[in-house]
DNA sequence: TTGGGCCGTGCATAGCTATGCATCGCCGGA
DNA sequence: TCCGGCGATGCATAGCTATGCACGGCCCAA
C-alpha cells in the first residue's frame, strides 16, 4: 500500500521539472528520495553527496547534484535534529529593544552565533513573568541554549528555566544554579568609579536615578556608588526611580531638582535615563551641564557620543560578553549542566563633556 | 533487535525518576514513548492528551500528565514539522539594528508573530550580497516565510530568494515577483510634503542628505522632494551622500555647509542622519536650527522627540506595516505563491521644533 | 589464477509525533 | 437476550535524513 502512494511521484524519466515532482498535497520541498529517484541512485548516495562524505563516486555526485538543482532540493535539518538531539538553535530572550545597548548586543550575538553555525530564535518577553508563557515553546523547538538578555530575571523565572535542563546564560543578572549561569559587567566597581570621579571634580551633593527596582544591574551600580560615597564621608545620594527610558530620566530629574535639594552630581543607571535627565535640566530647569550639575550614565549607547550629548558613561566590553556567552554555549553542547562560574567582564569609564567641569573652580 | 535497544530504557515499575529514564547516550528529552511506558498506556494516548483531543479518558489523562511531569516531558515540534511541512518559523532578516527604527519594527514583529503562534528566526546580514550565504540555512530550517527588513534588497538578492519558493516580504523595498512582495511607507509623498513644508516656511535653497545610493527608500524620498521643488520653481537641492548613520549625517552636513552654498532647508533620508547634521550645524558650524536652517528627517525614532532634538520627521505606521506583513504571511501559508500586490502604508508628518521658524520673519 | 582489500552502492533502520483504522468493552434499547 | 453504537484504546505508519552493515565489483599482489 505504500507502493501506490509512492507511485504518485513519478519516475526519473520525465524531462520537465514540474513533472518530476508534482506539488501534490502539502509538499513544499523535494526530499532526498525525490532526488534519488530522479538521479537514479539510492537515497543514501544523495545524503552522502550533501554531507560531503567521500564515499560517493564522481559520476554519482554529478548525477545527484544535477537532479537536486532541477528539483531545487535543499536538505532539511529537521530529521537531523531528531537523530542528533541537537537543533543548533539558540534562543535569545529580549525585553527592551528600545535600549540601543540591547539592540547592539543582540546584533553582536547574531553575528557570532551565525558564524559558529547556530541560528538564533528570537523571543520577546514583555516582563519576566511572561517568561512562563514562552518557555514551553522553546522546549518544543528543542533549542540548545537560551540567552536571556532581559534586564530582569527573577529567581522564580530562573528556576522555571532550570527545570527545562537547557543551559541558560543570563545577561547582567546574577542568578545562577546548575543550569543557569550569568555574564555581567562590573556594575559595582563602576558605581565606585563614578563616585570617585564626582568627588574628584569637587561635587558635594549627589543624586542617583535608578532603573526599575527589580533590576539587579541598577541595584549593583547604586550599591557601589553609595558605598564609595559613604567611605569618603560624603552624604548619601538622593535617589529617584526611573525605568531605564528617556522619559523616566526626564521625569525623575524634574522631581529631584524641582525641590529644594539640588544635587550637583547625578549618576543614572543607564544612558537613556541620563540623557532624559540632562534634557530636563537644560531645557526645563535652565541648569547647565556640567557647569551646574555633573552627569554620568551607563552603557555607552551611540547617542552618548553625539556632539550634543557628549555623555560620560561606562562602556561594556560587549565583545567579551558575547565571547564568554558563546563559549559557555559551545561547551555546554551535550545536555550536561553548566560547569561554569558566573562571568564578570570589565566596564571601562568613558569621560566626556558632562563631567568635564571642576565645580570648585 | 529493536527489542534490546528499547530495553535500555527501563520499564514503568521503577520508582525513581532517574531510573525511569537514564540519560544514556545523547538523549536530552523524554519522548512520548517514555511517558507512555511510565504511565502504562500507549504512545497514542500520550500524544492525544497533549494535543487536547477528546478521545482520552479522565483516568488516562491523569496518568499521562503525572508521568509527563515526572519526566519533564515536553512534546517536540520537530516531528510535527516533518509531517505537516509547516515549521511555524518565520525568518526575519535584518542588517542595521543600529537604527532604532528597525529595532522597534523588529520588536513589533516579534510580538505580533508570537501572538499568532509563530516563532522568529533572526538572521543577520551585513549587506545584501551576504544574503546568499544564509539562504541555504533558511531553507534547511524550513521557514514558512522570510521577512526582509534590510534597508537594501537587490533584484539579484530577491531572485535568489524567489528560487526558494518561500514567501518573502521585503520591507521598504519595491522589489517584487511571484514569491516576493513588499510593504513600504509613502516615501515619495513624504518627500513632496517636506518640500511643501520648507517652501511654506520661506526656505529658498535646499539640501538633501541621502542614505546609501542603493537604498530605494532614500531614492524615493529624494525623488518626491526634488519633484515638488521643481514643480514649484525652486532650484534643485544640493545633494550629499550619507549612510543612514549619525556620523554620516554629521560629515555630510560639514561638507555641504562648509562651502559657499548654504542651503536654508535640509531634508535627511532618516532621523539619524538628521540628528548628525543638526549637531554638525550647531556644535561645529555655529548655525542655529531652525533659525538659520530648517531640518527634517524620517522615521520618528525615539530620539527625534527628545527635548534637545525636537526633530520634524515622518512617522511610519509601524503597526499597519506589521499587520500587513502578518496577514500576507498567514494567507501564504500553504506553499502557494503570493497573491498580494505591494502594499504601501501611510507616513504621517510630525512637525516639531526644527522646522518651527518662518525664515521670512 | 586466486584471494584479499577497497571503493562504491544500496538496504534497513533510528528518531518522535500525529492520526486513520481496527478493536474492545460497555451501555442502552429493542 | 442480543445487537447497535459509542467512547476509549492500541496498532501501524508517514515524514526525511544519516549511517552501520552487507554486498558486489574491481584491482593488485602473491
Image (cartoon, coloured by chain):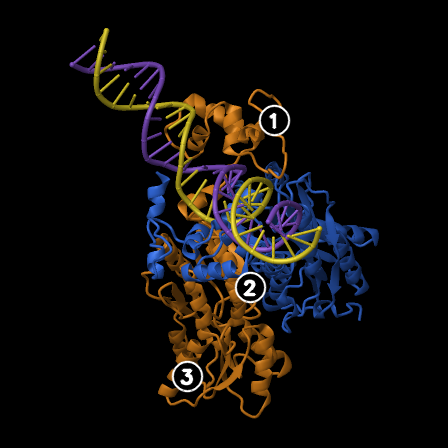
Chain colours: A orange, B blue, C yellow, D purple
B308 vs A27, nearest the viewer: A27
Nearer-N-terminus badge (3/2): 2
**Where residue B292 sits: x, y (%)?**
71, 67
Residue at the spot x=63%, y=26% of the render? A19
Pointer 2 local density, CA inside 10 Å: few below 14, some 14–19, many at least 20 = many
A113 vs D5, nearest the viewer: D5
Pointer 3 local density, CA inside 10 Å: few below 14, some 14–19, many at least 20 = many
Residue receiving disc 2: A97
Separation of disc 2 and disc 1 at Cα? 45 Å
Residue receiving disc 3: A226
Helix, strand or loop at disc 1? helix
Nearer-N-terminus badge (2/1): 1
Q: Residue furthest right?
A: B232
Q: Nearer the viewer, mark 1 or mark 3?
A: 1
Residue at the spot x=48%, y=26% of the render? A64
Helix, strand or loop at disc 3? helix
Nearer-N-terminus badge (1/3): 1
Q: Is residue A278 left or right of residue A105?
A: right
Separation of disc 3 and disc 2 at Cα? 29 Å
**Where residue B39 sits: x, y (%)?**
44, 57
Q: Which mark is residue A17?
A: 1
Amino acid at each position: 500500500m505504500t507502493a501506490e502512494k509512492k507511485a504518485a511521484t513519478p519516475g526519473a524519466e520525465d524531462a520537465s521539472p514540474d513533472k518530476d515532482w508534482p506539488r501534490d498535497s502539502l509538499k513544499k520541498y523535494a526530499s532526498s528520495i525525490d532526488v534519488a529517484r530522479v538521479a537514479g541512485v539510492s537515497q543514501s548516495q544523495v545524503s552522502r553527496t550533501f554531507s560531503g562524505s567521500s564515499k560517493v563516486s564522481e559520476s554519482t555526485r554529478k548525477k545527484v547534484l544535477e537532479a537536486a538543482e532541477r528539483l531545487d532540493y535543499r536538505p532539511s535539518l529537521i530529521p537531523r535534529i531528531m537523530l542528533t538531539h541537537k537543533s543548533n538553535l539558540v534562543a535569545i530572550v529580549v525585553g527592551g529593544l528600545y535600549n540601543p545597548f540591547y539592540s547592539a548586543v543582540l546584533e553582536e550575538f547574531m553575528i557570532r552565533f551565525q558564524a559558529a553555525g547556530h541560528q538564533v530564535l528570537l523571543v520577546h518577553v514583555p516582563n519576566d513573568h511572561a517568561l512562563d508563557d514562552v518557555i514551553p515553546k522553546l522546549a518544543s523547538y528543542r533549542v540548545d541554549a537560551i540567552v536571556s538578555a532581559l534586564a530582569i530575571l527573577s529567581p522564580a523565572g530562573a528556576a522555571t528555566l532550570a527545570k527545562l535542563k537547557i543551559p541558560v546564560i543570563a545577561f547582567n543578572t546574577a542568578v545562577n544554579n546548575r543550569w543557569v549561569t550569568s555574564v555581567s559587567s562590573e556594575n559595582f566597581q563602576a558605581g565606585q568609579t563614578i563616585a570617585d570621579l564626582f568627588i574628584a571634580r569637587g561635587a558635594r551633593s549627589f543624586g542617583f536615578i535608578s532603573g526599575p527596582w527589580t533590576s539587579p544591574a541598577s541595584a549593583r551600580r547604586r550599591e557601589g556608588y553609595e558605598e564609595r560615597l559613604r567611605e569618603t564621608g560624603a552624604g548619601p545620594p538622593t535617589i529617584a526611580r526611573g525605568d531605564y527610558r528617556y522619559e523616566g530620566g526626564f521625569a525623575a530629574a524634574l522631581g529631584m531638582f524641582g525641590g529644594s535639594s539640588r544635587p550637583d552630581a547625578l549618576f543614572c543607571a543607564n544612558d537613556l535615563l541620563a540623557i532624559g535627565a540632562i534634557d530636563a535640566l537644560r531645557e526645563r530647569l535652565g541648569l547647565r551641564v556640567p557647569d551646574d550639575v555633573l552627569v554620568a550614565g551607563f552603557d555607552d549607547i551611540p547617542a552618548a557620543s553625539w556632539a550634543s550629548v557628549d555623555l560620560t558613561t561606562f562602556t561594556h566590553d560587549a565583545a567579551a560578553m558575547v565571547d564568554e556567552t558563546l563559549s559557555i554555549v559551545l561547551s555546554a553542547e551535550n545536555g550536561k549542566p553548566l560547569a561554569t562560574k558566573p562571568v564578570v567582564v570589565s566596564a571601562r569609564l568613558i569621560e566626556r563633556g558632562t563631567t568635564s567641569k571642576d565645580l570648585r573652580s
